[in-house]
Amino acid sequence: MSKNTLIIFALAALLAPLSAHSVEPQRGRRSVNLPDGEGKALVEAVCASCHGLDQIVRSNGYDTPREWHDVFATMIDLPDPQATQVAGYLAAQFPDKGDRRPMLMPGDATVEITEWIAPTLGQRVRDPAEAPDGSIWWTGMWASLAGRLDPATGEMEEFQLPETARPHTVVPDDSGSIWYTGNSNATIGRLDPRTGEITEYQTEARDPHSAVFHPNGNLYFTAQRARMLGRLNPETGEITEVATQANPYGIKVDANGTVWVAYNGTNKIGALDPETMEVRYYEVPNERSRIRRLDIASDGMIWYGNSTMGRIGRLDPETGEIKEWPSPSGPTSHPYAFAIVDDIIWYNESGMRPDALVRFDPETEQFQSWPLPSGVGIIRNMWVTREGDLLIHQSSTNRIGIVKISGSRLTAQ
């Protein structure tokens, strides 16, 4: 049995045939009591070995065993008798609540969504990115790996990173090297896919989070709980880190070289000077506002998702003026990932089930939205490809996806 085999403590003998493509238990806890019923003990043993049982209780639920099976089959490969029992128990005890369905908006735009299941089950895929050769990379946070997908063939390959890394974000550089943030071991890492060689750079910040390359060649990153911003010079390995306001999260670079930072712990957006590392703060209305991700339009406007208020917003850096629009599914929609293609705003409503992909046209101020095919998880970040498509993921169901946008100027080039 490989080191990536999921070991079920309470029922190890019963579940010995588990797939070798599963994640070792990371969070062995039982945070809530499940209702009595046939299969309860099995669900507790299987599910609590990797995540809290509260995630089941708080889920939107499903009415049929087939639907529940489709979800947990991306996390663990159970023998048929146990899979049937787990699916039956979950469907009986946790049917669809029906209270988190998105308000889907009609429109004329069309998209085509393709998804792939990552090989190692339960790895919590996240933050896909496009490399110069067109391959798609992602991080498997719970399995401490980086994955590569050939979108033309669907072929996948995974690279084991240091066990303690638990990478959050992956960012390819122009040479084809893959950089990642070691969220659990306070490192920035570089993977050479050609050789498999890994180089780690130690950070003062304990939890490097999101990262972006700057035209000056440096890598800039956020550290959410450490409340720090960092800069790594890949040529020298020198790291500069500064304290910042609460919980910096998403990070982007505008056409003038300013590094923009979303704050998930306060109602602010930051503009970081790439040389001095000084931050100018812009306050978003309402102290409850929290920003996870942002992006920058061709006119320099900063667009963001206000997750706690269920709104999207636009910041004019020149005047500081902010305007916001309510997301279609309302205050609990939790806008999360954010991307701009041809000055059209794209984001997801992460509080809804299924997770909804939303398009907003700033000129007409009209919304359009689509349900994600495997919308159980959450799109936590999006990447715009050179062809003008969106790279997405569903962390809870182990999927990497691509959204082909019909009629974009980028695609037409």
Image: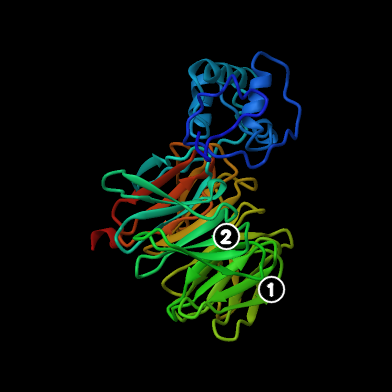
Residue 388 in view in this figure: yes
Q: Is residue 137 above or below residue 332?
A: below
Q: Is residue 382 above or below residue 179?
A: above
Q: Within 10 angstroms of label 2, few (less than 14), some, or many (20 or more) residues?
A: many
Q: Residue 322 appears at what percent x and percent y?
A: 60, 69
Disc ID at residue 114? none
> Element under label 1?
loop
Tell me which amino acid carries mark 2: Gly
Q: Residue 316 appears at what percent x and percent y?
A: 55, 74
Residue on which the image places disc 2: 182
Query: What residue is rendered at 46% in x and 81% in y?
Result: 256
* Along the viewing direction, whichever of 231 and 109 lies nearer the viewer: 231
> Element under label 2?
strand
Which image quarter: residue 11?
top right
* Along the viewing direction, whichever of 59 and 170 lies nearer the viewer: 170
Which image quarter: residue 262?
bottom right
Query: What residue is rendered at 66% in x and 71% in y?
Result: 204
The structure's colour scheme is rainbow
Query: What residue is rendered at 54% in x and 25% in y?
Result: 68
Along the polypeptide, which appears first: circle 2 or circle 1? 2
Tell me which amino acid carries mark 1: Thr
Residue on which the image places disc 1: 244
* Along the viewing direction, whichever of 121 and 329 lies nearer the viewer: 121
State which quarter of the image contains the C terminus.
bottom left
Q: Within 10 angstroms of label 1, few (less than 14), some, or many (20 or more) residues?
A: some
Task: Spot the residue most to the front.
Answer: 1
How many marks do you count on the picture?
2
Q: Residue 235 appears at what percent x and percent y?
A: 45, 79
Which image quarter: residue 31?
top right
Q: Is residue 164 above or below residue 123?
A: below
Query: What residue is rendered at 58% in x and 39% in y?
Result: 24
